[in-house]
Amino acid sequence: MILSAHQPAYLPWLGYFEKIQRSDIFIFMDAVQFEKNSLMSRDKIKTPQGGQWLTVPVKTKGHTSSTLIETEVDNSKPWRAKHLKSIEMNYSKAPYFKEYYPKLVHLLSFPATNLAQLCWEQLKFWLAEFEIKVNIIRLSSLNIKSKKSELVINLCKHFSASRFLAGSLGRNYLNEGDFATAYIKVDYQEFNHPVYLQRWGEFEPCMGIVDYWMNCGSGKINFTKGKADGV
């Protein structure tokens, strides 16, 4: 059994979903600390000038010790309307804009008060759109309080997983010796970004999922080919 884990992310990029698709169990790490200027609260769309960040404003008082469940979305700011306007301006001529834009308006209308809940509701939507059927578990629902390598090992033990799929940056913090002692094999995600037709010139990878969705549509994404379905 393969287990993977990742922090919540706003409008995640394609690599986030490839990691989930390769897993039997995915842990939604909503009980970890919020990181300012990370992909937890922002991602890019493509514009004529290149990538543009769409950022969810949060109330940062005490954020250095707050978990994502405790990190409040600053709904006093009109960020939803701004994000929708930016997407409309840059994707109105995309193949699936007219069909999908109303779905996006509905998705962003969800009245989330904290970042974890916002990302959770969005993740469920995207998994349904791309027909990814994996067992998703919220870390906050488990009574596991350890950190870093120990946390991951305890998660694998809890679910009897023999393999852990880590992101490429996992090499910087995972203690592979501890995993070997626990008889858990560590694999690292080496994501080969699919190329697809985009608006606004040459292809730029690592955009938020909205870019792929508006240009290529929903349905299963074939990550094993050089190009994504829909090209």
Image (cartoon, helix red, strand yellow):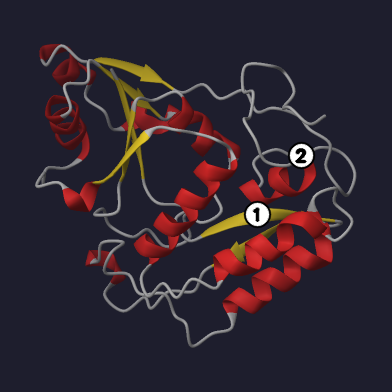
Q: Which mark is residue 44?
A: 1
Q: Is mark 1 on a helix, strand or loop?
A: strand
Q: Which residue is drawn at 89% across and 56% down?
A: 93
Q: In this view, does 128 lie above or below 222?
A: below
Front-most of residues 35 and 83: 83
In the picture, measured across the screen, residue 85 lies left or right of residue 185, that is right
For disc 2, the marked residue is 216
User: Residues under labels 2 and 1: Cα distance?
Assistant: 17 Å
Front-most of residues 61 and 108: 108
Q: How crowded is mark 2: few (under 14 residues within 10 Å), some or many (20 or more)?
A: many
Compare marks 2 and 1 and give the one earlier in the sequence. Answer: 1
Residue 66 falls in image quadrant: bottom left
Residue 221 falls in image quadrant: top right
Q: What element carries label 2?
A: helix
In the picture, measured across the screen, residue 71 lies left or right of residue 197, that is left
**Amino acid type, mark 1:** Lys
**Amino acid type, mark 2:** Cys
